[in-house]
Amino acid sequence: MAEREDNRWVTLVLVCLAQFMVILDATIVNIALPTIQEDLHFSQADLQWVVNSYTLLFGGFLLLGGRAADLLGRKRVFIAGTILFSVASLLNGLATSSEMLIAFRGLQGLGGALVSPAALSIITTTFPEGPERTKALGVWSAIAAGGGAVGLLLGGILTETLSWEWIFFVNVPIGAATAILSARLITESKAERAGSFDVIGAVLVTAGLIVLVYAIVKAEAFGWGSSRTLLLAALGVALLAVFVFVESRIEGPLVRLSIFKIRSLAVANVTLLLVAGGLFALFFFATLYVQQILGFTPIEAGLAFLPVTVGIGAGAGTAQVLVKKIGVRANAILGMLVAAAGLFLLSGIPVDGSYVSDLLPGLLLMSFGMGNTFVPITLIATTNVDEHDAGLASGLFNTSQQVGGALGLAVLSTLAADKTVSYLQGLGHQPGPQDRAAGLVEGFQVAFTSAAILVTVGAILLAVLLRSRDVANVNPEQSATVVA
């Protein structure tokens, strides 16, 4: 009996190690973006693909990964995802062109989409409901939060002391050890009922999103109203429309469309699509600003963003109190308005700015607001959902976060690049280094302003579309378990 209990905690260590690797990768890459851009000759507009190729494949296949884990075996899918993630990490480090890095980052995202849902499913099936599962999920949540913070600093250290390739190479030994030990120590489990999983749906939604993002990114070069941009956008929308059609007809769909009849779930997911765009913009553009404009080294840049992690944690802690005092709806709206205020503050960053006076206040305000947003939004998205739909609701929420971040970053990157080009072309002379820096900052300002508008629109939609009775069943006591 004692040996079986010990094995449960060994299993927890292994799945948390893999999840730490996936979470780490989400932030570690941001710090290395300027170095990657210089070495692989990314344009300012195309640089976002380093983030978005990973995000789109991760978000697009997340639901399929969870379904595959239940039907094919949670241990089997977890190990397969860990191996795929590790191999893709190795290939990323060996990439010698922007095209190779973008392709292998997508492969890495697919691996992450297999690892994350399988890992969480292993925890919930290994630990019985009650104090032990609560403790295990608490460790899982702490690992998830810690991975983001460690990634910021480790990304700077590896990029500066070794090279940007090592932000990917570091995953290889971790993944290899996790896969080998998991094969020996984790017990296999499957869902009791047989069924099918919707590969066609996952491919359609991911392809549609990739084409749509590509159309947005290339709009700066092709022109927003050009035939190529419009045709690409139409193709992306058509693929998404086919996805909806297939989901409404197929047996065992990836997403059962009737779940969106739950008003609280639908509104929360739409709101999160907008909010995630603002959060992705924060890390992407602020990272470029501190290194390309303020001249920070990668290590200094990593340290510069640690207050963001503290701010999100403080906001999440505050939210656990506020949801009981003012309710989830009011708390979510308040959090988004605070985050939007921080982004509006960041939109005033100057070329000759300083970190403490021009960047840090906006970072703290935005991160505190985001922390105050995620807890109530999670509660809203998962209330009024039947127990047998809990996994689907959770998967939809995570997918909305990834897809919203990818679409938002694509739009904001394109707007920023367009503003930069417009500024430089309007100078009337050959731009020098100071002119190029000023052009970049003009683009960053547009991006932060647009991000603030996205988050503000999210707050307005939530206020208008969500009624108090839609969240009357929310249990505030759940807030302690949804922070991650």
Image (spheres, helix red, strand yellow):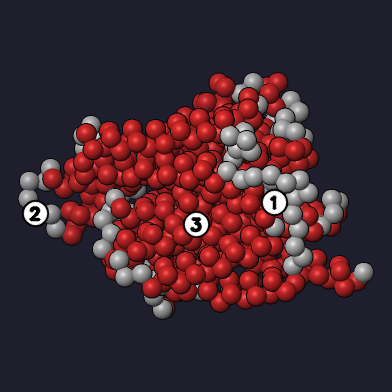
Q: Which residue is mark 3?
A: 109
Q: Which residue is mark 2?
A: 430
Identify which amino acid the numbered label 1 is placed on.
Asp
Residue at 23% across, 47% down: 420
Which quadrant of the figure has residue 222? Answer: top left
Q: Earlier in the sequence, mark 3 or mark 1?
A: 1
Local packing at callout 1 (Cα closer than 10 Å; few below 14, some 14-19, many 20+) is: many
Identify which amino acid the numbered label 3 is placed on.
Gly
1 or 2: mark nearer the eye: 1
Q: Where 344 sits versus 15, above or below?
A: above
Report the side of 119 relative to 299 (left or right). Answer: right
Which dot marks residue 70? 1
Comparing 461 with 63, the one in front is 63
Residue 405 location, x and y as percent? Answer: 47, 45
Residue at 51% across, 62% down: 25
Are dots 3 and 1 in contact, CB under 8 Å?
Answer: no
Residue 6 location, x and y as percent? Answer: 83, 71
Identify which amino acid the numbered label 2 is placed on.
Gln
3 or 2: mark nearer the eye: 3
Report the side of 377 relative to 97 (left or right). Answer: right
